[in-house]
Amino acid sequence: MYHRCPGLFSHHRYRISRRQALRWGLGWGAAALGVGSAVAFSAQPKLARKQLGRAAAAPTSPVWIGRCSSYDPQEVYQALKNGISSVVDLTKLVAGKTVTVKLNMTGPARDLLGRPASETYHIHPTFAEALCALLDQAGAKRIALVEAWYHREPVEEILTKAGWNLRRLQSAAGHKVILENTKNLGSWKRYVRLNVPWGGYLYPAFDVNPWYEKTDIFVSLAKLKDHATAGVTMSVKNLFGILPTSLYGDDAPNEDSLRARVAILHMARRKVPDGVPAEVGPDIPTDPLLRVPRVTTDILGARPVDLAVVDGVITIKNGEGFWNEGVELVEPKLVLVGCNAVCTDAICSAVMGYDPCADHGKFPFPGENHLQLAADAGIGTHEVDRIEVLGLSVREALCPFRTPPALVPGGTATTWPPRIPANVWLG
């Protein structure tokens, strides 16, 4: 089924409370089905190893929501220009600087539900073109587009096969774009180590390709999606892909690795290679529903985001890629932009009809809520009523993705989270 989600309410800007967000989000889905209010139903996992308690003082930053009805290059460019200029002076941010953009292109590019990957689970190339054009116009010195692709081919070949027009991309960027596959060292001679300020929920530091450290500004260019393990994936969960498969993949250490990061990061079935920062104890979980949110939060702490851009024009729900069963197309027709990744993803979650402050193990988070972990670490607030929303309001942009199984006739807890077939964890 192909879902269209136009604006639902009258057009005006105002801030909302957490209770309102919950009522307009989960409550909207319940009302549409003619059943009772949302209820929690997932088994409660263990709480995070470290309760840092900084959520009340976590910083807040505005988030812009805008309508974008298609991937027409001019429409995407105008939407991004409006959004970025609403939250930051881009010239002051990037003029004369190196900008590294982490693309959200997890998993190989293949058609899904009759649509290309860029319209389902990958960032669309027009977003990269528009962003690079704006960065060039703002005076960026150079622009690196990076991702840990599961391929040996040159990045140019990977992107071309995925439908990207590299000549148009370079032209838009003033020929300043550098492409690199960060699944290994790439063009560098040694890895760099990024430390987690609070010592880490699970890892105290990460060894990564130097592009993530030797840059002045870091941008997360993400897709608006559900996630089978993390609940949601936008600008924060996108960072999971910065860890090189050469060091964190199932066959690590291997500079030619094409394997996903399952055995080490998801399942704790292997240890990181010698010399790579190991997990912090004493209680080390083996459940992916605990590990993935903690790893995700630790990465954000080690590599903070300066600008978060989220493609919500066309996407999927019920999972994050072709490896999830039961995914469906959904068309929110939205772009979201913010300078704080946690704040941005909190508003993204609210727009999807979810409560970003849901407790660990409560819908839509099957395990720990990584937005709560990030707030507790003081990275950014996930409380909707503390975040200034610019452009469209959450109510105007609301496009419910999933409804708790308890609210679906015949639904049970066994239908959520989406089942992940064995050996195809890619995120």
Image: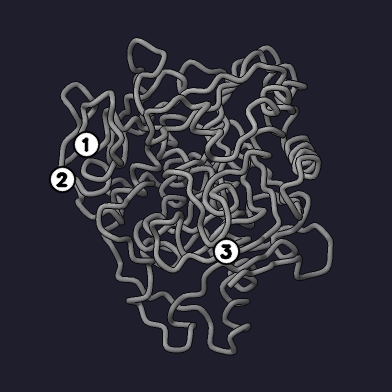
Outermost residue toward the right? Answer: 11
Q: Which residue is mark 1?
A: 279
> Residue sitting at 54 percent across and 52 percent down?
382
> Which of the numbered marks, if any, corresponds to residue 329?
3
Is residue 379 shown above or below 210?
below
Question: Could you say which is closer to the camera, residue 371 or residue 322?
Answer: 322
Q: Quadrant of the N terminus?
A: bottom right
Display colour scheme: one colour
Question: Could you say which is closer to the camera, residue 179 or residue 229?
Answer: 179
Give the residue type at disc 2: Arg
**Residue 369 coordinates in the image, percent (x, y):** 41, 55
Is residue 235 shown above or below 16?
above
Q: Which residue is mark 2?
A: 269
- Assess disc 3: are there few (<14), some (14-19) or many (≥20) residues with their C-alpha within 10 Å of its C-alpha: many
Give the residue type at disc 1: Glu
Is residue 61 shown above or below 173?
below
Q: Quadrant of residue 96?
A: top right
